[in-house]
Amino acid sequence: MRVFGIDCGTECTGYGIVECDSARSSQLISLGAGGIRLSRKDPLPQRLALVYTTLLTLLEVHQPDIVAIEEVFYSVNAKSALKLGQVRGVALLAAATAHLPTAEYAPLTIKSTVTGYGLAQKEQVQFMVARLLNLTSVPDPADAADALAIAICHIHHAQTLALQTANL
């Protein structure tokens, strides 16, 4: 299973591709990660277009089986939440345009799956992502580590669901 994780952001949208190698004891393998950096100087439609076209290209290159994305979270600042929702909508549109299924996970679920603690700090998530993927360093930017965490979360949930279904 190859999962393309997306961590939506208004300044940087992270992405990460994780594959589960079932032939090697379900070992997780990072196939790449990075961030789509957005300039505050550019108008919002231009930033959204950049996220969309970049994600479409990356989805075509990496050929994932599924796209995993973080669910909307509640924000004190309504304007920031709205902008984040727009980026998230563009990411979902890119997945749909590429004819890929999507899975969505709450931030607490992602952190809990990766670190064992739903209120883990960003640094703890980064450390565990590097450890689970046998990386020599923490992924940079931080948004890329979050995207990898989302992909890892989906793989773990899919494996658990498969085991539960097999036992029925």
Image (tube, rainbow, N blue to C red):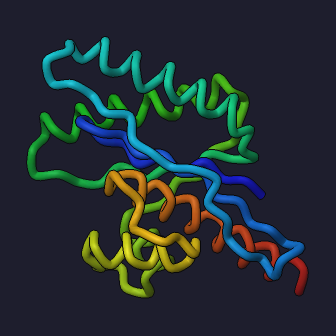
9 shown above or below 145: above
Q: Position of residue 160 (x, y in %)?
A: 71, 78
The reply, left or right, for residue 52 in relation to residue 83 is: right
- The residue under the point 75% across, 46% down is 65
- The residue under the point 25% across, 75% down is 121
Residue sitting farthest toward the left: 77
Q: Quadrant of the C terminus?
A: bottom right
Residue sitting farthest toward the front: 136
Q: Position of residue 7 (x, y in %)?
A: 41, 48
Q: Quadrant of the N terminus?
A: bottom right
The reply, left or right, for residue 109 in relation to residue 74 is: right
Q: How many marks?
A: 0
- The residue under the point 59% across, 32% down is 58
The reply, left or right, for residue 113 in relation to residue 38 is: right
The reply, left or right, for residue 123 in relation to residue 50 is: left
Q: Position of residue 91 (x, y in %)?
A: 48, 33
2 shown above or below 63: below
- The residue under the point 42% across, 26% down is 51
